Structures are given as C-alpha cells and as structure tokens.
C-alpha cells in the first residue's frame, strides 16, 4: 500500500512542478496586445475537472490548427477573412473531440466583438471590453475561460493564469461574462484562473487515492 501511495505522491508532485514551470515561462513572455488583434476565447461548460479537461483538449487542437494558417495571415483583413472562413472547420473539430470523449452538450462557435474581463498578467493589465474574437462556448459556457491572440499569432501567450481585476468601465460587456469569472479581486490576486489547475490536480489526486484505497 505504501508503495502505491509513494508513486501517486511522486506523480502528483511531478505534474504540479511541470505546471508551475510552464506558468513561470509563460508570464515571462507576456507583452502588449496590438490594437488590431483577433483573439480566441474558449468557455468551458463548468469548472468541473472533466469539463476543464475538455476545454484544454479543444484548446490544444484549435491552436495547433490555426498555427498552420499563420503564414497566410499577412494583414488584419486577410486574417479576418481566413479565420471567418474556417469557423465551420473549428466547430467540426471541437464537436468531434467532444463526442469522441463522450460529451453530449453543445459546442457553439461565433465571431464578433466578444466581452472580455480585465486581466492582470504579470505586471501588465489588459483592460476589459469587447474585442474582435472567435468564441468557443462548450455547453452552458459558465466555466473558467481561456484566451489568447490569434492575430498577430501570439497564442503561445497563455492567459489561463491571468488575474481578473474589478473594472466598472467594462459596462454591459462585463455583465455578459459567466458567473465563474466574477471573482473578487482578492480571490483572483491569490490564484486567479490558476485555481482551475490546482482544483483539477487535487480532484484527480483524490480520485486516484480513493481507487487505491478501494483496491486494498
């Protein structure tokens, strides 16, 4: 029994350490977002670990798919036309992934001026407002979100661990955000969307330990 517990703990520490190193590297690469930018925003069905897992799975696929097209995006206008033309493909890919893993809820993809909350990322604040973006909503779309910049291609800048900051100037755009994103500045300063990663790992670890206990 102790052997399996030790292996589980070692694996858990390894995963957490990898997440921390990734987050530190990402923060170091953050920078200003150009005014003429097109973003990608993905909203999970909920904050449940399995829904957040699906969000990341679809995120990785969509980002990889769009990165193959960056050579054709030589201006905002060409990028806009190309991205809009690929919306059906993005929807099909996202739906295929969801169905392949047994998720039956809806997958909606739209393009336009999408509301974003204020984000503090490292020492930089990204103001709230409505920005041109592709939005992928999974199910109810009330879970923690992830976003990046499709054009210019900055999707290596992972905004998952940014901290939300209360900003009354966001107006109606902020009212349309999922409830899961409306945390107080204190809660966000202490963890922000990073809590999403910690909860996922802790839930996974607890489930794993329960299985070990039942086995013995």
Image (cartoon, grey):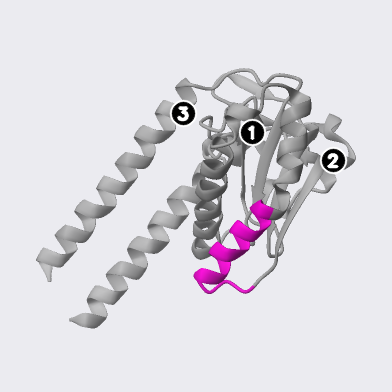
Q: Residue furthest right?
A: 172
Quadrant of the rendered image containing residue 214: bottom left
Question: Residue at the spot x=53%, y=29% of the render?
Answer: 157
Whichever of labels 3 and 1 marks the residue nearer the N terminus, that label is 3
Residue 91 drawn in magenta = yes
* Mark 3 crowdedness (10 Å alpha carbons): few <14, some 14-19, many ≥20: some
Residue 164's tag is none
| Residue matched to label 1 | 150
Image spot of residue 19 (x, y percent): 38, 41
Q: Magenta segment, which residues?
A: 89-104
* Mark 2 crowdedness (10 Å alpha carbons): few <14, some 14-19, many ≥20: some
| Residue matched to label 2 | 173
Question: Residue at the spot x=80%, y=41% of the render?
Answer: 114
Image spot of residue 132 (x, y percent): 79, 34
Residue 16 drawn in magenta = no
Whichever of labels 1 and 2 marks the residue nearer the N terminus, that label is 1
User: In the rendered image, is residue 142 in sight?
Assistant: no
Q: Nearer the viewer, mark 1 or mark 2?
A: 1
Q: Is residue 91 above or below residue 36?
A: below
Q: Is residue 91 left or right of residue 27?
A: right
| Residue matched to label 3 | 26
């Amino acid at each position: 029994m102790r052997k399996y517990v030790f292996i589980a703990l070692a694996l858990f520490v390894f995963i957490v350490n990898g997440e921390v190193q990734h987050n530190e590297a990402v923060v170091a690469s953050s920078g200003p977002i150009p005014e003429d930018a097109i973003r990608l925003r993905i909203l999970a069905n909920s904050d449940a670990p399995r829904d957040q897992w699906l969000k990341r799975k679809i995120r990785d696929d969509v980002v990889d798919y769009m990165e193959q097209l960056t050579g054709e995006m030589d201006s905002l206008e060409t990028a806009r036309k190309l991205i809009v033309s690929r919306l059906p493909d993005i929807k099909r890919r996202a739906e295929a992934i969801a169905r392949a893993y047994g998720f039956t809820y809806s997958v909606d993809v739209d393009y336009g001026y999408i509301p974003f909350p204020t984000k503090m990322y490292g020492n930089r604040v990204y103001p709230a407002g409505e920005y041109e973006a592709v939005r992928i909503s999974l199910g109810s779309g009330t879970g923690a979100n992830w976003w990046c910049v499709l054009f210019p291609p900055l999707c290596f800048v992972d905004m998952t661990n940014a901290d939300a900051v209360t900003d009354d100037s966001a107006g109606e755009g902020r009212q349309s955000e999922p409830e899961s994103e409306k945390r107080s500045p204190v809660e966000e300063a202490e963890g922000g969307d990073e809590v999403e990663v910690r909860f996922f790992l802790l839930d996974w670890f607890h489930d794993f330990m329960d299985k070990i206990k039942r086995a013995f």
